[in-house]
Image (cartoon, rainbow, N blue to C red):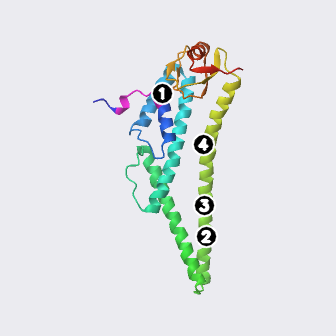
């Protein structure tokens, strides 16, 4: 039986993985050696073609997959703390286990600090006047909480900014393609699902869903339009 890492990854499989990850609420099953397969795919593509159009697009697809999974891991870690479950069978990649454990521990610590603060405040309201030493201790805890919250906020904003930058890159590429196709290429809008195909520039394209705007070689654009699978977008 062949090793999982020997299975050749394709751009088509990577796109399908992204779509499935985006469609499903839970983490999808990728296989323990998914990232190794991706690494081998990137290495072969770069050696054979350099940073080609397919290579660059594949890198962006992988970034999107990773971002989608990070968001799900955050939700799962929060749920695990709330319910007290160990959340078995999450389909985590080996590289994701540490992230899940770290997030789970952070949420546990945060909830403990909140409970301690609430309990202390309740005691004070009930009439047990705290000493200056206790009040100073509470002030220190609050300060620590604020620091932790600030750090967490910065981390969250950094992740959001990174995801936003990835989305902007995809949007910018789409906008550039819509207005300034390269010489020898045309922009078309698919009118039906289009399977993966080899372009006349020897690059892999697709699969594409109905309604996508894509930049492909002139000859391939003409074929899709003549077959009724796409319509030409006027420049």
Please name which of the two marks, 4 or 3, marks the residue nearer to the observer.
4
Marks 2/3 in contact by CB < 8 Å: the verdict is no
Residue at which label 3 appears: 149
- Marks 4/1: CA distance? 22 Å
Which stretch appears magenta?
Answer: 4-14
Residue 120 x, y percent position in the rendering: 56, 77
Q: Nearer the viewer, residue 224 or 126?
A: 224
Residue at which label 1 appears: 12
Residue at which label 4 appears: 163
Please name which of the two marks, 4 or 1, marks the residue nearer to the observer.
1
Among the two numbered marks 4 and 2 on one chain, the one whose residue lies closer to the N terminus:
2
Among the two numbered marks 1 and 3 on one chain, the one whose residue lies closer to the N terminus:
1
Magenta-drawn stretch contains 12: yes
Please name which of the two marks, 2 or 1, marks the residue nearer to the observer.
1
Q: How many marks overall?
A: 4
Q: Secondary structure at mark 2?
A: helix
């Amino acid at each position: 039986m062949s090793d999982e890492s020997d299975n050749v990854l394709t751009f088509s499989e990577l796109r399908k993985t992204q779509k499935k990850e985006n469609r499903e609420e839970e983490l999808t099953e990728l296989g323990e050696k998914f990232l190794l397969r991706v690494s081998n795919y990137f290495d072969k593509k770069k050696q054979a073609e350099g940073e080609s159009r397919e290579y660059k697009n594949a890198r962006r697809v992988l970034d999107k997959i990773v971002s989608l999974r990070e968001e799900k891991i955050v939700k799962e870690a929060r749920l695990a703390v709330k319910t007290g479950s160990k959340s078995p069978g999450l389909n985590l990649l080996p590289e994701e286990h540490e992230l899940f454990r770290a997030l789970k521990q952070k949420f546990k610590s945060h909830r403990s600090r909140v409970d301690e603060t609430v309990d202390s405040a309740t005691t004070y309201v009930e009439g047990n006047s705290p000493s200056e030493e206790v009040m100073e201790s509470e002030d220190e805890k609050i300060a620590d909480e604020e620091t932790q919250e600030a750090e967490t906020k910065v981390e969250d904003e950094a992740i959001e900014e990174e995801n936003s930058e990835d989305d902007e890159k995809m949007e910018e590429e789409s906008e550039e393609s819509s207005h300034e196709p390269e010489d020898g290429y045309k922009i078309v809008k698919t009118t039906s699902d289009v399977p993966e195909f080899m372009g006349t520039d020897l690059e892999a394209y697709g699969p594409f869903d109905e309604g996508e705007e894509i930049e492909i070689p002139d000859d391939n654009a003409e074929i899709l339009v003549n077959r009724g699978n796409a319509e030409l977008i006027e420049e």
